[in-house]
Structure formats: structure tokens, C-alpha cells
Amino acid sequence: MSQPEMYFFWITVFCYVAAFFLYLYRFLSGSAKADKVGTWLAATGAAVNFLVITARTVATGHLPVRTLYELNIVVAFLAVVVFLLARRYFPWVSLLGIVSVSFAFLVMGWGYADSTAALPLTPAYKSRWLAVHVLFALTSTGCYVLGAAAGIFYLLKARFVPGAEPERYRMLPEKEILEESGVKFILLGFIAGTIMIISGSIWAKLLWGNYWGWDPVETWSLVSWLIYGIFLHLRFIYAWKGRKLVWLGLGCLVTNIISFWAVGLVTPDTYHTLDQITRPIE
Amino acid sequence: MKNRVIKMLVSSRTALGLMSGILCYIIAAVYLSPLTGDGQSLFGGWWFAAALSWLALNIMVCSVRRASRLYGGRGGGSETRHGKRPLNINETLTGSGPGEIEAGLRRKGFKLHPVGERVQADGEWAQADGEWAQANGEWLQAVKNPFSPWGSVVFHLGLTVILAGFGVSSIFGMSGDVMIPEGVAVRFPDDLSITAQGPFYSAAEPYLVGLREFTVSEVDGEISQVRGILDFMLGDYRNPYPTEINKPARHDGHYWRIKDYGYSAHLIIRDKSGNTVIDDYANIGKTGGRHHDEFPLPDGSSFTIDFLEPDSAGRAGQADRQAGTARAALRIVFAQPGEAGVLAAGTVHRGAEGDIGDYRVSFPEYRYWGLFDVSKDPGEPLVYLGGLMAAAGLAWRGCFIRKRVWLRFAAESGDTLVYWSARADYFSRLLENEVRELLDDKGGNA
């Protein structure tokens, strides 16, 4: 980790942590100023996070997608960018920053604790599909996290009879709006996830000779995509609503988290790490 | 009865059931695969292919039915269950005049039409609710993204085109592999080890394929790229094709992809009396991640070779092999079958020779061998087309949602009383909020 990258990293973490506490304060006290300063800090954090990514790219000579640390600094950036873009259209979304921004600094911290050592790209990574595949995968995760955040606030608000909820819950929009916004973020994540799977299949064909190989990471990505597909069909075709839909959405996020982080941890023999030149010969 | 069974087999409910079933099986297979030790076989069964085919057929039929409804102007209202709800009429008192409101809607990308007028691709509402509109006076309809429902059709058809591509490849395609040492040519297709072949695969005219050159580039001791130049020879004519990881060579509809590589060592072994026992290239395979292999000797004994890779110190490929300082070496172990075990062991560097037990071993040079995955994939254009359709269709449907707003204006003591209703294919409540903001609500919402 270079010196500038380290400075940028800690400034980013500071901004995200401060933004998180300000959003939390906003939720608990209703302070509009906390919301404004929190958003300013989150935006500054995202800008400096971009500098972390740039410094890493310059230092390693490739997109930072090789190690857990690199993936996590990119996913943190995209999660906050998705959140800030959503906030532009729906100002109340700032409360979802409690989840999105905390997600960002937690994954950054996890990546930092794992290892910040730079690794060279193996030949398997040297593909024009790398950027498309990884960036859409991480964008979909950022959208799913925001969708889950809307779901969490829906569940919090749904505990009360409309009109009888404590003051802080009145800052949130109606439950239906929360639910629709959550589904909208999930739909956007699903679009990004679809592009991720298609680009990954094309890349796999060039690299391994097959579009699909049932590797644990591939399998869990498909599981996640299918379950989100079922979620959207239940919502749009069968008009599922309310708590059961929100809980299903949160369950979907678990499969996404497994496909993105946990498979690599529990299945070290996955060839999706791309450490090897080619797929092991069956 | 027959029609009901067919309808059931191709309904969207069945599609959802199939998706859920396939999902559950995949999750179960993830946990079963360590027990069976072969994850591939769990997904290779005919019934799994049949379930996928059924799903593809189901999706295709649902999409075609949906397309025909949309084309006939009957698909809009039944897009969602909540789409069938009666319109919820709101009343808003606003200071803006009808012209300003209409201009505001136009700025947001809406197109306005009188309700009685049939709107292209959206006529179903005007048709179905025409009576309602007539009964309620002069209404305007504002429509945004009227063709959005077609995105859903394109997306689902894209998925079936992808699956059709896989089907075409499995019927007309093939896959196999072949090992080619550097400087050697093999016959295609005779020398190929076929791993899968479709019933209608037809091999091309036989030709020779030679591996002209193979290089392994390294940066800081790590492999950075693997490249080869393949010569496709038809008669006296040579077509050289460069290939590297992620960039397979393509010749005559077949992909030639580097799958693995290893070393091929030129070995000369002489016995005590100076007779040459072996003078050939030994293609050293890989065992447990090492370049290790076993070879027989004419007397029934055998020897193993471990290829000790050179310390390249930044050099690569041919350049490294010509450099003299960091030399590759072979660790050779002669062994007798049975209890006698190891007879002798020793190491010989490239360009040197030495005595190992009863043999004099010389290692003049080495080269690479490449293992190539050869495949014909005639369904590839369909897979690419389907991928494009699926991505574009979904983005079209998800990012450009069809929105409709119905408006009627009435004068109310200097202000405008607007009767309105808003409906989006998805997220109607968000659209209603959007319309409320546009109408500059003066608190007259009833």
C-alpha cells in the first residue's frame, strides 16, 4: 500500500464513519443539518474513495479487482455512489445511508484487515471482459444493499400503526413508497447482475472453453440471480407486497453476499480466484 | 381438458415453479457435490437438461403470447395483478393552469393525447376504459415510454435464444483436446481426444496443425502471459494464428484455446557400453502441480523426471532458453519395479551431461508442449445475440418504465381543479408522488 493510498484510505474511512453517525443522529433527532453534513461527508468520502482506487490502479498497473481488499474498496465506492445517486432523486433516501455507508466502511475495514498486499494479474485476468464483469457485479451488490436498506426501514416502520409511529419514523415516506423504492433498487441491481452473468459467461468461454462450469462462485451467482428473478416475478406478476416480500428481499441479499464473499472463503478450491493459468483439467 | 393441460404446462405460474425447483436443486447440489466428488455429474443428467428445456419452452411461449397481446393492443392492463385495479381518481387544487401542467408533463418526457384517441402501443387502455372516460368527460392521457413492455418480451426471448444457442452447440458442436509439443504438428481431427461430440457434428477436411512457437512470459517471477503460434497447414499452405490466454485462435469454425502447458525435455540416455537407450523428447506432464512424469525403459525398469524450472530473472520464453546463466535442470530417478525400488538418482542441467547409476544422461535442450482445447461452437452467434437481447431488453424494461397519467381540468375560483390518476407498470406510488409534485398541490387533495 503506497503512502498516498494509505492517507486516502483513512480519510475515506473517516468520512464514511462520520457520515454514518450523522445519519444515525438525523434518524434519532430529526436534525436536518446532520442530514446535510452527512451527505456532504458521504460525497467527500466517495470522492476520496475514488482516489484510493486510482492510487491502487497506478501502483499495481491494473484495475483493483485482484484481492479481497481491492474488490472491497471498489464495492464500497459503488455502494456509496449508488446511494448518493438515489438520494438525488429521493431525498428521504439519506436515511438509508445508515446501512449503505456503514456497509462501505465495514467492507473496507475487512479488506484492510485481510491483506493490502498487491498481487500481479495472472494471465487469466487479462481480458477485456474483466472490467465489465467485475464492475457490474459490484454495482449490482451496491444496488441490492440499498434495496435491503429500504426493506429494513420498511420493517421498522411497519411495526407501528400508520400515524401512531414515533416522530423519527415520520421522516420516512409511507411504507408503500419504501417498499417500491426498495424493489426499484433491486430491479436496477438485477439488470447489473444480468449483465455481470452474461459477460462472465462469454469470458469463461474464451478462458476455459465453456460458458458455464458450475464452479461454486458461478453456481452461487446463478442462485442469487434466480432468486432475485423469482422475487421480481412475485412482485410484478403476482403482486406480492408487504413484510413477506421484504423478508424475501433480505434473504436474496444473503445469497448475493455468499456468491460475492463467502464462497471464496468456504470453498478454496474454486477456480474463480483465477490464480491458475487455466481451469484444472478434469 | 387437453387445452387446460397445455395451458398449465406453459403458464407463467409453471415457469415460476420450474425456476424455484431448479433453484432448490442447484442449492442442494452445492452441498451434495463434495459427497459425490463430482459436481459436474449433478448437472449433467438428461432430466436437468429436460427441466431447462421445459423452462426455455415455457418462457418462449409466455413471451410470444405476451408479444401477440401487446401487438394486438391488449397487453398493457394485464401486465401486473395490481394493473387490473380500477383507476384511483385524485383531485388536486393547483395554482398552475392546464397549459403549465401539460408543459410540465411534456418536459418530463410524457406525450399527451385525448383519451378517446387511440395511442399507438397503448390503445388497450383507451379501448378498455373508453366508456369510463366518456362517462367522466374530457380526459387527457399522458404516456411515457409506451413501448417499455416490449423490453420484457425481448429480455425473455433473449434468454431462450441463449438456451437455444447452447442446444445448437451440443447438437452440431464438439470439444476435445490435443497435446502439441513445440515444433511438432498433429493431424486434425485424427489426433484429437474428443470429449464431447454432437450427433450432427461434421468434421472439416483433415489438416495439420503445428505449434510453431510457445512462450511463457514472466514479470517478477510470476507468469504474466502464455502465448503460442499455431500453424494451420493445408497442403503447402501455412496459416499462422497467434493465440494467448483469453484469446483463442479460430480456424475453420474451430477454437484452439491454450488449456495447459509443460516442458518437453530432449534426453539422451546411454548405458555403460555406450549404446543409446533413449534419444528423444520426453513430454513431462504435471503431477500435483509439479512438472513430474514417469517413463519406461526398454529393460522393463522406469525412471521419473522432475523438471526444475530455470530461475528466469526476468527473462522469458525463447530468450530465457538461449540464456546461459540460469539453467533448467532435470532430476532423474531410475527405479526398478517391485521391492528393488530406487536404483539411482541425480540431477542434470540443461546443456550438460552426467552419470546417474549405470546410465550416462545428457540434457541438451528443452521446449514446451501445449495442451489445446479444441471446440466447435456453432451456437455461439445465438448465445451472443441472446445475451445482447437479454441485457438490452431488461435495461429497456427496467430503466424506461411505462407511465400513464390521466387528467381532467376544471376551473375553481381562479385556480385549477385537476382530477387525475397515475399508473406505472411498476412503482405506481412513486409516479403518484411525482405527479403530486408537478401539480404544485395547494392542499385541495380529496
Image (cartoon, helix red, strand yellow):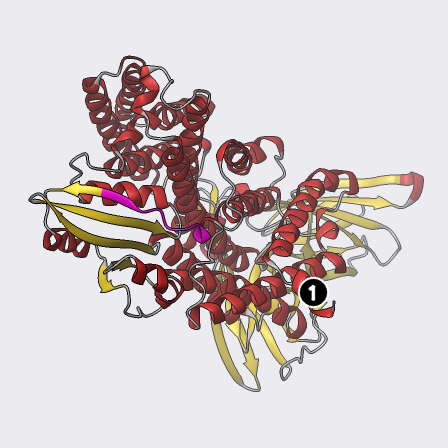
- Secondary structure found at label 1: helix
Q: Position of residue A254 (x, y in %)?
A: 54, 33
Task: Report if residue A5 is visible in the image.
Answer: yes
In the rendered image, residue B382 lying in the magenta stretch gets the answer: no
Answer with left or right where residue A209 lies relative to residue B189. left
- The foreground one among A136 and A129 is A136
Residue in view at x 89 percent, y 54 percent: B300
Q: Residue furthest left?
A: B414
Q: Position of residue A180 (x, y in %)?
A: 39, 39
Q: Residues within 10 Å of mark 1 (few under 14, many from 20)?
A: few
Q: Chain of mark 1?
A: B
Answer with left or right where residue A146 lies relative to residue B320. left
Q: Which residue matches tag 1?
A: B4
Task: Quadrant for residue B434, please give it.
Answer: top left
**Which quarter of the rendered picture does the N terminus of chain B lie within?**
bottom right
Answer with left or right where residue B49 lies relative to residue A180. right
Residue A276, above or below A19: below
Residue in view at x 23 percent, y 60 percent: B138
**Which quarter of the rendered picture does the C terminus of chain B lie within?**
top left
For the record, the magenta segment spans B83-91
- The foreground one among B20 and B209 is B20
Look at label 1 and name its amino acid: Arg
Q: Residue furthest right?
A: B339
Task: Report if residue A56 is visible in the image.
Answer: no
In the rendered image, residue B85 lying in the magenta stretch gets the answer: yes
Q: Position of residue A251 (x, y in %)?
A: 55, 33
Residue in view at x 21 percent, y 42 percent: B92
Q: Residue furthest front?
A: B135
Answer with left or right where residue B101 lies relative to residue A228. left
Q: Position of residue B115 (x, y in %)?
A: 28, 63
Residue in view at x 27 percent, y 36 percent: A90
Residue B363, above or below B384: above
